[in-house]
Image (spheres, rainbow, N blue to C red):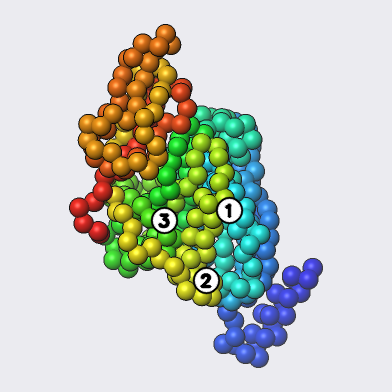
Amino acid sequence: MLRSFARTFASYGFFFLFPLFAPAQASSFSVGTASAAPGQKSMGYLEVAAGVDAATNIPVVVINGEKPGPVLALVSGAHGTEYTSIIAIEKLINLLDPSQIAGTVILVPIVNVQSFEQKVPHVNPVDHKSMNRFYPGNADGTQTERASFIVTKEVVDRCDYLIDYHGGDLDESLRPYAYWAPTGKQTQDRKSKEMVLAFGLDHIIVWRDRPTDLSATRYLDNTSTARGEPSIVVEAGYAGIVEADDVALLVDGTLSTMRALKMLPGNPRPIENPVWLDRVVDVLSDGPGIWYPLVKRGTYVQEGMKIGFVTDYFGKLILEARAPVSGVILHINAVPSLKKGDNIADIGVVAAHAP
Ligand SMILES: [Zn+2]
């Protein structure tokens, strides 16, 4: 009741007397069932109705700043066991103060609720699909596709900037890094580069040649990028472990990026000399077996160097895994289990020149 009174008053009273005083921020901002007036924080859900499989509710928070400004979306938990990124967004839900913010922040802490609750890595256990591969989604598809459709409509289509948070999954020992995906559009690329530098992670992958077909953008950040919104991906945390330092990287990086976007007072603290990586090479397992790593996340390896080995279930050596390129171990398999086609490691190749 209070809200509808305020709206009536604003449109008849103030607007009539002071027609220039009609800022867009003076109204509430709604995402899913969350609706926040300026200066307020509101919690709700993106409701994904039942279809060919079960319904699901994705938690969403809207923090509507007192001052006008852009809309920034922070999304984590597409992979529900990449815990560090989820905990970082949970911290930001409490930390961000609408009285300090210029603009609006949409926070989605856990996209893949079933993965989180059932401790299933990589996919949504309902339909066994990755929740970061089916964008922009499909209203008539399986749960992952319907959820992706709603995230596109309610979050991507509503924001000006987007940050997608990931990390090492239960079976991935990962060192922190970010992705920057230039599009060739100068203004957008300048802004997204400013964001990724302000975030402050010291290794940045330059991700080129991504899908540009708006109906098949696959990844969340790419869905937003392809719609003209500067967007980045950040990764920290590994193997189910939530370390305070990793959470702090994501929380502080977000605050610094918000300062760069003028959504918070103060100056950003951009990384001055990041390591730019222009290629990521997968090392895959060609059969099942037991994995023994010989290097750690973040180790720099030379082409040909042994990074681990695989035995069969009787202890017989069946594979020596060697680095196919020189570079940095971005993540390496964190557990002994290996099946055919599993990712043993990802190696980032250092770019010859900074972009
Ligand atoms: Zn992920």
Asked if disc 2 is less than 8 Å from ligand 1, the answer is no
For this rendering, which residue is in front, 144 or 100?
100
Compared to residue 289, the image places residue 157 above or below, namely below
Q: How far from the left and from the top, in percent, is residue 263? A: 52, 71
The residue that label 1 is drawn on is 89
The residue that label 2 is drawn on is 263
Quadrant hosting residue 264: bottom right
**Residue 201 image label:** 3
Asked if disc 1 is less than 8 Å from ligand 1, the answer is no
Q: Quarter holding the N terminus?
A: bottom right
Q: How far from the left and from the top, in percent, is residue 19? A: 59, 87
- Give the residue at x 47% y 27%: 335
Compared to residue 236, the image places residue 102 above or below, namely below
- Residue type (three-letter) at the residue carrying disc 3: Leu
**Residue 155 image label:** none
Q: How far from the left and from the top, in percent, is residue 111? A: 56, 44
- Give the residue at x 66% y 59%: 94
Q: Is residue 338 left or right of residue 72?
A: left
Q: Secondary structure at mark 1?
A: helix
- Marks 2 and 1, Cα distance to the nearest angstrom? 17 Å
- Marks 3 and 2, Cα distance to the nearest angstrom? 20 Å
Q: Is residue 38 left or right of residue 349?
A: right
* Neighbours of disc 3 within 10 Å: few (<14), some (14-19), many (20+): many
For this rendering, which residue is in front, 79 or 295?
295
Q: Secondary structure at mark 2?
A: loop
Quadrant hosting residue 11: bottom right
- Give the residue at x 74% y 70%: 3
**Are the two marked residues, 3 and 2, in contact with CB atoms closer than 8 angstroms?**
no
* Neighbours of disc 1 within 10 Å: few (<14), some (14-19), many (20+): many
Q: Is residue 59 left or right of residue 333?
A: right
On the question of residue 203 being in view, the answer is yes
